[in-house]
Amino acid sequence: MDLLIDRFNYFAYVVLMMIGLHAIISKRNLIKKLIGMSIFQTAIILFFVSIGVKEGSTIPISEHHAEPAAEHGAQAGHHGEHGSAGHTNNPDHFANPLPHVLMLTAIVVGVATLGLGLAITQKIYRQYGSIEEDEILEKLRSTDV
Amino acid sequence: MGEVVESSKPLWACLVSLLAIVPIVRNRRSPNVRDFWSFVAAFAKFGIVLSMLPLIRDGKVIECTLWEILPGAPIQFRVDAMGMLFALVASTLWIVTTLYGIGYMRGLKEHAQTRFFAFFALALSATLGVAFSANLLTLYVFYEILSLSTFPLVTHHQDKEARRGGRTYLAYLLGTSVGFVLPALVYCYIKTDGNLDFSPDGALSGLLSGKEAMVLMLLLVFGFAKGGLMPFHSWLPGAMVAPTPVSALLHAVAVVKVGVFCILRVITGVLGVETLRAFDLGTVIVWIAGFTVIVSSLIALSQDNLKRRLAFSTIGQLAYIILGASLLAPKGLTGSLMHIAMHAFGKITLFFCAGAIFVANGRKYISQCKGLAREMPFTMTAFAIGALSVVGIPPAGGFVSKLYLVWGTMEADMYQATCFYLVSSFLNACYFFPIIFAAFFQKPENPANGIRESHPCCVAALCITASFTLLLFFHPGPFYWLANMMSQVVF
Amino acid sequence: MFDHTLMLTILPCFFAALAVTACGLWKPRWSLPVALLSVGISLFGSLAVLAEVMTQGRVQYFLGNWSEPRGIGIEFNVDPISSLMLVLICVVSLLSLIYASGKITEELPGKEPLFYALFLLLMGGLLGICMTADAFNLYVMLEITSLTSYALVAMGNGRRAAFSAYNYVIMGTIGASFYLLGVGYLYIRTGSLNMADIFRIIQLESLQGSPTITVAFIMILIGMLVKMAFFPLSGWLPNAYTHAPSVTGNFVAPLMTKVSVYVMVRMIITVFGIEFTFDHLPWGQTVVWLAILAIVAGSIMALGQSDLKRMLCCLIIAEVGYMVGGAWLANIHGMTGAVFHIFSDAAMTLCLFLAAGIFHHKNGTGEIGSLEGHFRKMPITMAAFTLGAFSMIGVPPTCGFFSKFYLIRGGLESGQYGYVVALLLSSLVNAILFFRIFETAYFGNLSEGHHDAHGNDDHEVEIDEAPPTMLAPLVATAAGLVAIGLFNSEIAGFIQRSLTPLAVGGTW
Amino acid sequence: MKYLSLIIVIVTGILLLHASQDFPDWGDAHSPANSNQISQHFITQTGEQTAVPNFVTAVLADYRGFDTLFETIVVFIAGIAIMAVLGLVRMDSLVNAPDSPRDPTDRDIIVIQTCRVITPVIQLFALYVVAHGHHSPGGGFQGGVIFGASLILMAISRDLSAALKRISARRAFILAMVGILIYAGIGMLCIFMGGNFLDYSVLHPLLPATDSVMARSHGMLGVEIGVAFTVSTIMFAIYALLSSGGRLKGGL
């Protein structure tokens, strides 16, 4: 039970993902399939993001930086005290940036795939006048004979 | 094995007919020039092969490495007595067959003669490649090339019958070679880790357990189905749809003998006599071959189509050769090697005759041969000689080799083998002599007026081979001592 | 020494893709030369990489110069196998591009620039997959190839193109997502994305037992099996490749599945390590049996096809079975055979697809029955086709024979006799399939017989060959088949240079 | 089919959950992923190495800048792929197609006026998000999407042709290419300056008053701008193509 409490994020994403997968496989409507596909991908994104979370940490932006970064413009070429001059951030205070970066990519890819899928669906509709898989297959069979 | 001489002659012997294809195809418009080129190639090949004879006689071995295609298993030629013998037979008979083929093709106005001669040449180079190959891989490569290059020849007529024949032909040859030989080849490669060379005492000797040896032997012996061992023989009668010159050269000489040759190589060079003796595998082959001998002769009796009867007789004779080698006795091997040559000359004569009869007056069936000798005396005389040779009665070459074979059985005291030989000789007599008798002593139903021989080229060719058959009885020539050298090397 | 050879190989594709799109906006007829030029540069680059790898063993490149600590930035890492893959991809692209230049205006009127742009992007993605040493970067590259190939398949004007492309999209996305999920599992356990680094961590903390790594492996494997059309997951392939424009099929069919196979091999050898894959995972045997199933199923499906291209697609499925099975034989010869077969199979598939495309171009139909008398009608094409077919059957000295040789050797050494038998059976089935075609092409229709062609061969069907832009690539490929066959021992030796160092667990 | 899929789904789910048993707990700061030296490095060293306070931006545009380049290319691919698939307009005829605007009756004055007011605000905000990506959440993608959204809003509120008058599909694609060219061009520039691809630190001779560290920061800015160009225009192009069924006329 406490396992469930500690790991609810994993359970959540698995459930979401399975919903998506089920939709992809069992739905006969092309648009619904695409929706399932997006749910599927989103679940993975959720999983990744939940990896990078740290209890009680903040967004991965170091607040000390506003002025040092500005002063850089003024006296540049001054090595040693770049960025957070002197003191280094404690990793535990900031969320892990890497998963966020990765997921930014994954999101973009998802968008692109979805757009392409929609375009193809439009073309199918133009050709067969339907987006129901069964009807399309029916039409194909009729053209074969 | 004697000292090794590096020379590119074997390569050229192999290539010359391949190169001949170019002029043959380029002169397709003018048949005479085209056929002239075939002759040139044939003689050139014969010359090259002959020029290697003295070296072999001095017990040397000619080697020529082409390409290290697999580590340890290059494409390599090595000419030893056995290969020399086979190459000599093939290249001699190619000349005659070219002569005959020209006569036959023109006599019948066959179509696509250029393709015919081109693939003929290709098949010949593949044959020599097999004869000279130095290791199992090279052997396999040329074996496959031969199967594929003879397909267009077998199916030359391009009609339904030809298609059926071609299908069985490829189904058997490719099926067995890919299905049996290839795994066996790889297994040998693993066992010897990467050395497939034929060596007189067997590349695999001492590396195999009894079961492995058994399996390998069966895979290889049946895999080279060109040897026509039952139950993988039925491509041979099927392939008789081919034009007679093809049947003559390929199915009396090149193809089938290649199969037998490969099996002999396997027995002597790959598995090795020692291994076979150790696990007493020789007798297994003896029984298989003996069965083939008897059964094929019996089937031959029942055939009325002349070429089919000859085909089954061929199957029997091939089994002779394999049987002789599997006796694992020196004289037996000598005999079987000689039989390669003797049977080649005898059988090609018979095929030539069958073709000539067909060309002259379209007869295919034995029942039509009554009194044929009056129409075509030369042909039928030659036929008689060939038959004598195959049955093994002096004064024909077949007698000599058969003598040695029987001697071998005595030597290996396998008396069942002796029985096989004697019974089958009797059967051979049974299925040949009626033809001769009918041809010479029976009255034709429709008495023809005068002599109607077929195309002069055909007659010339079959007279040559017939006289060779006689000659070989009185003087077996190089074939004897080549065979003898080989069996000395092996044993 | 110029140390950006990798960039020289991969970047031209993307810059040229932009340039081609620009050409599309202004001067469409310049798009072809630009594309050819860039592919040529890439080819040159890949050869340079190959030469470098031959001398140094491997080429590394740290993008943004972030080399320390390992895996902080993105790393390119090319070992012998991948350098060969690069050359393969460039060569295949060049040939199929030349072929396309002759055919495209007829197949995709008005879309040439878009086609060339997508073509180049796809090629770049494939190159990236083979170069990168970063698990996530591989995913990005994978998606680039997927998106472009979806589009290329869906571009066709054929009635079925779009629908087959749709299934392709769905399956492809599932595959890629599974791969991404696998990477996520790797990341959550090891905290790294760099392949070598992941390998190091798995060894260091001896994570072989952890279910996470196992599931990660399963996910990545499933993803790749979907992408490579491994039998039960291969439903999308025949439709997609058959109904795609032939200019697309010639490029996608030889490369996509092979590259996925390569990714699987790379995951096995560089990320998870062979002794994890073959010793810790209990089901290596199962995969081999699945491969046998795939081989048999592919061959049987092929027997049922009357359309040439469709038949070839089924054969691809069987060949994928060869490679997966070979890779899972768990010995070096099997793996060598699998990798070698990647190359030979790519060459054969290209050869046969080019020929099929030419037949389709001439006859307007892909039916096998329409090939009557082609040995006389187009001898050169048929000759090349015959070579390809022989290679499929495994006739020496074509490359198909030698890949079979290595695979059979691996099978015998690891005692997988079922696999060997399946291999031989499928080559026999190939023999049947192709000789069926040869018979049609050689005998013609037998009804009217041959007797019209008496005498010598003067009055015959006049030769009517395809235009040189289509013929040249075909002939080159056919020659390549023999060349790969003749140089097989060199290639195999080179491949083993990146396999032998892995013999840590004594698996081979 | 349904049952089959259920079986597959359940099996997969069980597999995944089985794996999650040795996952770290949620939010565990010391899970392998979080305690790994690499993610530590990003948090601790980014400041010194790139002078960018926003780690995500730094990782995105610099450490893993190559991924991002291809992300951008993926967006671009989506654009041309959709055009290729719908395939009704020839590329060289992508000029602003004269289209009869809808009759005014079905235009809602309130909607139009509201949009007219807020569109510039949205666009301004988008530019801010792009430019301030170093110091606050944001960056090329976010800003680009917002900008694209403003264009789409325009298209929805009036009609497609109105939006296409302002930025035609042709121009959209040109700008998208320019965007990628900026990104990849900066990368190439790094090679010409003697560094590796996308190694901005070697650019400092070109930029006034910067050292190699600030050069990275500036390089990222340029890259982000390129990304913004591509994303915003392609987002709009995708909308235009899909909404008009590839005709670039009429629309919703």
Image: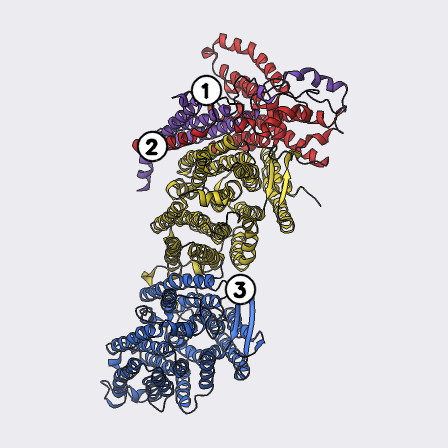
The answer to whether one can see residue C261 in this image is no
Chain bearing tag 3 is B
- The answer to whether marks 3 and 1 sit on the same chain is no
Q: Nearer the viewer, mark 3 or mark 1?
A: 3
Q: Colour of chain B?
A: blue
Chain shown in purple: A
Chain bearing tag 2 is D
Sooner in the amino-acid sequence: mark 2 or mark 1: 2
| Residue in front for this viewpoint, B73 or C8 | B73
Q: Which residue is mark 2?
A: D5
Q: Residue type at mark 3? A: Gly
* Residue C462 placement (x, y as % from top left): 46, 60
* Residue C228 placement (x, y as % from top left): 45, 42
Q: Tell me the crowding category of disc 3: few under 14, some 14 to 19, or many 20 or more residues within 10 angstroms, Cα based.
A: some
Q: Residue type at mark 2? A: Ser
* Residue C121 placement (x, y as % from top left): 55, 38
Gap in angstroms between the C-alphas marked 3 and 2:
53 Å
Instruction: Say which element carries label 3.
Output: loop
The answer to whether one can see residue B305 in this image is yes
Q: Which mark is residue B31?
A: none
Q: Which residue is mark 1?
A: D252
Q: Which residue is mark 3?
A: B72
Chain bearing tag 1 is D
| Residue in front for this viewpoint, D217 or A30 | D217
Instruction: Say which element carries label 2.
Output: helix
Q: Colour of chain C?
A: yellow
Cβ atoms at labels 3 and 1 below 8 Å apart = no
